[in-house]
Amino acid sequence: MLPYPSVDPVAFSLGPVKVHWYGLMYLVGFAAGWWLLRLRARRPGSGWQPQQIDDLLFYAALGVILGGRIGYVLFYNFSAFLAEPLMLIRLWEGGMSFHGGLLGVLVALGWYARREGRRWFAVVDFLAPVVPIGLGAGRIGNFINAELWGKVTDVPWAMVFPGAGPLPRHPSQLYEFLLEGVALFIILWLFSRKPRPLGAISGVFALCYGLFRFLVEFVREPDAHLGYLAFGWVTMGQVLSLPLMAVGLFLLWYAYVATASENKRRAS
């Protein structure tokens, strides 16, 4: 068993204002994403200028924060919101939904694409490879907050989390950091280094994230107020990940099969 490296969730204070590590992790994710997007913009034929990245990231950040928090309330904690509506704005306490954040980003990028006269999927494909940086940073924030821990286990790297009882558990936040953050970033960054059909990069993102999240849910403790939704093992995270995987498969099929068939038909 490994000791849990207890870290004060408050990184530092500025008078009465407390700056939490969870919020700083989002800042790290946005800053790293901004830098990487500028690198992508400098690639020959990218169609992007480095100065356009600032506006793009603003829209994406708006979608992440609003969509992530609203999605968490709707999908995971609606009863708490009804009892105390102000919990919606207490982001420093944690509680962000990836699936809600994804929907928020897609809506925000649609707004951005329309304003800039760009194709929506072209914008999504451009942004997708840097998203795992933010996801990984968010999971580190979950780990520091000692939240979203895993199931009880006897694996050598198990940890006893504050507030989770005396038994060692899977550090599922770190599993998600490695899969959703590190592995997904490597996959998408390498895949996007060559020109791809429209929607293909978004398809790989949706498929891989959905698969990684679905698998980690087997060792992650479900939210106490939700529990398992069916069969004693199906979680809300898995339910929300299934359509994401389906969308990913459809986008890859459309990008490589349907589009090729359509181009061949037109050529003939």
Image (cartoon, grey):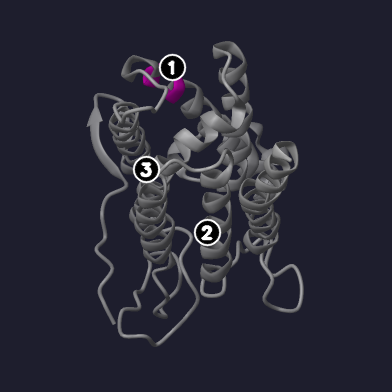
Quadrant where the C terminus lies?
Answer: top right
Q: Does dot 1 land on a helix, a strand or a loop? A: helix
**Mark 2–mark 3 distance (CA, rounded to whole Å):** 25 Å
Query: Quadrant of the rendered structure where residue 194 is?
Result: top left
The amino acid marked with disc number 1 is Asp
Q: Please, which residue is most extreme toward the front here?
A: 268
**Mark 1–mark 2 distance (CA, rounded to whole Å):** 27 Å
Q: Which residues are magenta?
A: 53-57
Q: Position of residue 267 (x, y in %)?
A: 69, 38
The amino acid marked with disc number 2 is Cys
Where 145 falls versus 170 (above or below)? above
Q: Nearer the viewer, mark 3 or mark 1?
A: 1
Q: Position of residue 141 (x, y in %)?
A: 36, 49
Residue annotated with mark 2: 208
Which disc is residue 55 wearing?
A: 1
Residue at image x 57%, y 26%? Answer: 109
Q: Position of residue 136 (x, y in %)?
A: 37, 51
The amino acid marked with disc number 3 is Tyr
Which disc is residue 22 wearing?
A: 3
Q: Does dot 3 land on a helix, a strand or a loop? A: helix
Q: Earlier in the sequence, mark 1 or mark 2?
A: 1
Q: Position of residue 247 (x, y in %)?
A: 68, 51
